[in-house]
Image (tube, rainbow, N blue to C red):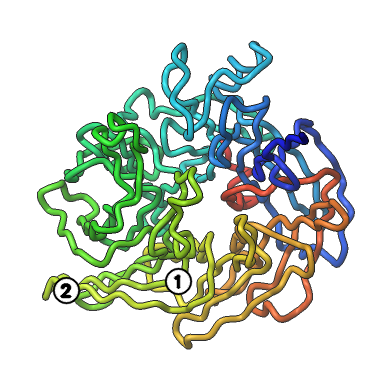
Amino acid sequence: METTTAVNPFLEGNFAPVREEMTSDPLKVIGELPTDLSGMFVRNGPNPQWTPIGQYHWFDGDGMLHGVEIRHGKASYRNRYVRTRGFEIEQKAGKAVWSGILEPPQPDSDGYKNAANTALVWHAGQLLATWEGGAPHAIEVSQLETKGEYTYNGKLASAFTAHPKVDPVTGEMMFFGYSFAPPFVKYSIVSPQGELLRTIPIDLPMGVMMHDFAITANYTIFMDLPMTFNPARMQRGEPGLMFERDRPSRFGILPRHGDSDSIRWFESPSCYVFHTLNAYEEGDEVVLIACRMSSTNVFVTQPEQRDPDGDIPRLHSWRFNLSTGTVREEMLDDVPIEFPRVNENLLGRKTRYGYVGKMAPTPLPLFDGSIKYDLQAGYAQTYEYGKGRYGGEAVFVPRPDATVEDDGWLVTFVYDTDAGTSELLVLNAQDLSSDPVARVLIPQRVPYGFHGTWVSQQQLDASV
């Protein structure tokens, strides 16, 4: 009798890791890189160093940074692992020591490994690689070498969200850390100079997975969504972390420098949000725009437990009226999308445009195009990557000295499944119907990953 071995799709194809760290300069360019596009695109993502223990989840892999530096119309590439403490221990052991989030922690390990594999943020002259369960890691640009955990001179008193927010006007950075023991959320503010100023607890009824949040000019918005952690479930042999469809969603609006007593909570129907596009204030209302899904199967391992309508994110807005206490939720488009970005020079203020990845109609999280939303005109423009070509999060890069919001470029890695090759795609953000501005060919495959950032030439020159 023939036996078959189940293959984990997140260890196959272009989800599979690449193990070689390389530097390549110069790269072949199809088209022409604009002379005023100068800086470095860096993207983070999971890339397991060793064969995983037990069931592997895409969220588990060791962080690997892929960077393309562009200057004077030329480009170079390098990729480096984020050398976390767990990475170094496993490298010395020559095998995986930590299991992933779908398995109980290894008895001889201290919980789950900080993989530093999710996103990146630039603040106060420092590039940080983030992972929501622990401290960020400081990264040296443009070499992409790991300096080590970054704890704000020992002041970091919580985990550190994968998606901190930098106010482009004040220069402050806001972040939070959630945990499954009280206080369930801690909220922190970092000065423009990089000093951790304060950390306060945010009261929640129970522990939840809070992946993202949002800021406006005056408020911070927390999402208490029904992806709950319940120790009693674990004792019954059920998942500790589970989506509860019968619980409502709660959104907390806190004056940026307020405390837990000054937060106002608004209820809306049960949903889950991994990523927010932006938020802003308009009259008596605080407006949030984010990718909403009715539920999520992210930690469901049994097919019969999966919600067929889960994990289909669509762009929605919520309007929270601070005078009347009412909330109005609206779907802005019915196309499945994720990985939302805006021109971050306007983060927390009303933006006309938003950029998202268009999800392919496949069981795996693949993106077959980029969409630009004109939120003022209610109009969308799509760039399709082409047959068998899939991309990732497209980051908006503003043109230096631009005078209009959408003057700049979208940059993302794209993989061609037929050719087995990767490239950095540069699109004209003002017109996605036009041909790419440039295609930068990468000398090795770049696996699908999570979030990236653009480090401008000015930031590169001022890095610490």
> Which of the pair 123/49 is nearer the observer?
49
What x and y, as percent, mark residue 195?
Answer: 35, 35
Q: Position of residue 98 (x, y in %)?
A: 53, 22
Label 1 Cα crowd, 10 Å radius (few <14 / some 14-19 / many 20+): many
Q: Is residue 366 left or right of residue 308?
A: right
Q: Is residue 316 above or below residue 26?
A: below
Q: Is disc 1 in contact with disc 2, using a CB cutoff of under 8 Å?
A: no
Q: Which residue is mark 1?
A: 315
Give me the residue at 44% from left, 48% from top: 163
Q: Classify residue 120 by image quadrant.
A: top right
In the displayed structure image, the side of residue 314 where residue 247 appears, left or right: left
At 64% from the left and 46% from the top, the residue drawn is 42
Q: Nearer the viewer, residue 281 or 379?
A: 379
Vertical side of 427 occupied by 107: above or below: above
Look at the numbered disc 2 and give the secondary structure of its residue: loop
Q: Position of residue 270 (x, y in %)?
A: 29, 62
Name the residue rendered at 73%, 64% in the picture: 426
Label 1 – label 2 distance at C-alpha: 20 Å
Q: What amino acid is labelled 1 in the image?
A: Leu
- Which amino acid type is marked by label 2? Thr
- Element on which disc 1 rests: strand
Label 2 neighbour load within 10 Å: few <14, some 14-19, many 20+: few
Q: Which residue is mark 2?
A: 326
Q: Foreground: 254 or 110?
A: 110
Looking at the rendered image, the quarter that the C terminus falls into is top right
Earlier residue among tags 1 and 2: 1
Q: Where, quadrant-wise, is the N terminus in this rendering?
A: top right
- Whether residue 195 can be seen here: yes
Q: Residue furthest front?
A: 1
The numbered dot on residue 325 is: none
Can residue 345 be seen here? The reply is no
